[in-house]
Image (tube, rainbow, N blue to C red):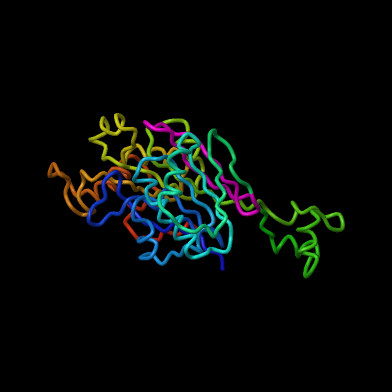
């Protein structure tokens, strides 16, 4: 049975807290696992979440700030220690090649797995298969940063009543799917478009065209909301988003499920109060997202949470 879900390994921004590890997110997409932004401690969080090195097929790094990449060394060495039987591909900004090299070879170990390096230096499609196309779009941050987007190809849903009306049944159903027509009946006459699912991962960035290009029409958008709206000046200065900004992007882009994450340490644990004594920070992120007009499914992420992709419409 195919599984499509997000496994949240960490939700902190620059500084981890008692209850938030540095970033780390695994997307299970059918039989494939894509690890995004493995920050420090990701290997241990994988253990706690029941994620094995064998589950990984691809690693995507948005940029080379430590909270998004320091876990690379441990994850890569674990992949080799466990002798993962399939090749793994790593995507990251080409401008950070020196950082990737240092992390990949931070200490001595025996390489047993083929790790393909596929750096990113422009917007576009990075990889394409029958299951999905992986896109990258540049973001706006003090260091070069890219977001990632998975787009499943559209398929077709067979319509039983139309098949029956044309007397198409049994093996002939598969035949018309393969050949596109049967006995003068076109596939389009007995089926409808089944829109492919879409997922986007947007980390450290100000509002920019890339954010909207990644979010457009997504079934799930995982996006940073480092600050609350009252700290928007700090967000712009440091190249980040607020909860309200992230939610407006989701609303304007037609996102179905919004996942907010990458929270500043200036706010206490979800359900606590901010350092300035304001409202409960966990609830406040949700409140501000709703106040921005986002009405879809909403998750304020917490470590080790599992979030299934929405069912097809």
Which residues fall within the magenta stretch? Answer: 129-154
Residue at screen point 43% across, 30% down: 208
Magenta span has 134? yes
- In the picture as drawn, the residue positioned furthest to the right comes out as 183
Which one is in front, 52 or 153?
Answer: 52
Q: Is 257 left or right of 159, judged from the image as shown?
A: left
Image position of 48 with respect to 262: above or below: below
Magenta span has 153? yes
Residue at screen point 18% across, 53% down: 272
Where is residue 262? Give x, y as percent: 33, 46
Q: In which quadrant is the N terminus drawn? A: bottom right
Residue at screen point 32% across, 44% down: 289
Could you tell me how many numbered marks the image carries?
0
Query: To which quarter of the image does residue 52 belong?
Result: bottom left
Query: To which quarter of the image does residue 61 belong?
Result: top left
- In the picture as drawn, the residue positioned furthest to the left comes out as 277
Where is residue 22? Give x, y as percent: 32, 51
Where is residue 146? Give x, y as percent: 47, 38
- In the picture as drawn, the residue positioned furthest to the front comes out as 108
Image position of 81 with respect to 284: above or below: below
Where is residue 137? Give x, y as percent: 51, 36
Which one is in front, 213 or 84?
Answer: 84
Q: In which quadrant is the C terminus drawn? A: bottom right
């Amino acid at each position: 049975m195919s599984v499509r879900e997000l496994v949240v390994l960490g939700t902190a921004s620059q500084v981890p807290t008692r209850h938030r590890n540095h970033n780390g997110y695994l997307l299970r997409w059918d039989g494939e696992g894509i690890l995004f932004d493995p920050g420090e401690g990701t290997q241990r969080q994988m253990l706690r979440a029941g994620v094995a090195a064998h589950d990984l097929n691809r690693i995507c790094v948005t940029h080379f700030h430590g909270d998004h990449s320091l876990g690379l060394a441990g994850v890569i060495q674990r992949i080799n220690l466990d002798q993962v039987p399939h090749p793994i591909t790593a995507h990251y900004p080409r401008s950070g090649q020196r950082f990737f090299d240092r992390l990949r070879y931070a200490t001595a170990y025996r390489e047993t797995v083929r790790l393909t390096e596929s750096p990113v230096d422009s917007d576009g499609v990075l990889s394409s298969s029958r299951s999905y196309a992986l896109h990258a779009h540049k973001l706006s941050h003090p260091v070069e940063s890219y977001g990632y987007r998975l787009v499943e190809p559209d398929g077709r849903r067979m319509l039983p009543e139309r098949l029956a009306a044309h007397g198409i049944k049994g093996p002939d159903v598969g035949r018309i799917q393969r050949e596109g027509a049967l006995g003068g009946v076109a596939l389009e006459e007995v089926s409808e478009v089944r829109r492919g699912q879409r997922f986007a991962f947007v980390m450290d960035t100000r509002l920019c065209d890339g954010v909207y290009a990644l979010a457009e029409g997504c079934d799930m958008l995982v996006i940073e909301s480092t600050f609350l709206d009252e700290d928007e000046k700090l967000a712009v200065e440091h190249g980040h988003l607020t909860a309200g900004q992230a939610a407006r992007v989701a609303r304007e882009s037609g996102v179905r499920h919004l996942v907010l994450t990458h929270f500043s340490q200036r706010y206490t644990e979800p359900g606590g109060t901010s350092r300035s004594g304001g409202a409960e920070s966990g609830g406040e992120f949700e409140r501000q997202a709703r106040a921005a007009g986002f009405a879809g499914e909403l998750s304020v992420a917490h470590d080790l949470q599992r979030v299934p992709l929405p069912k097809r419409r």
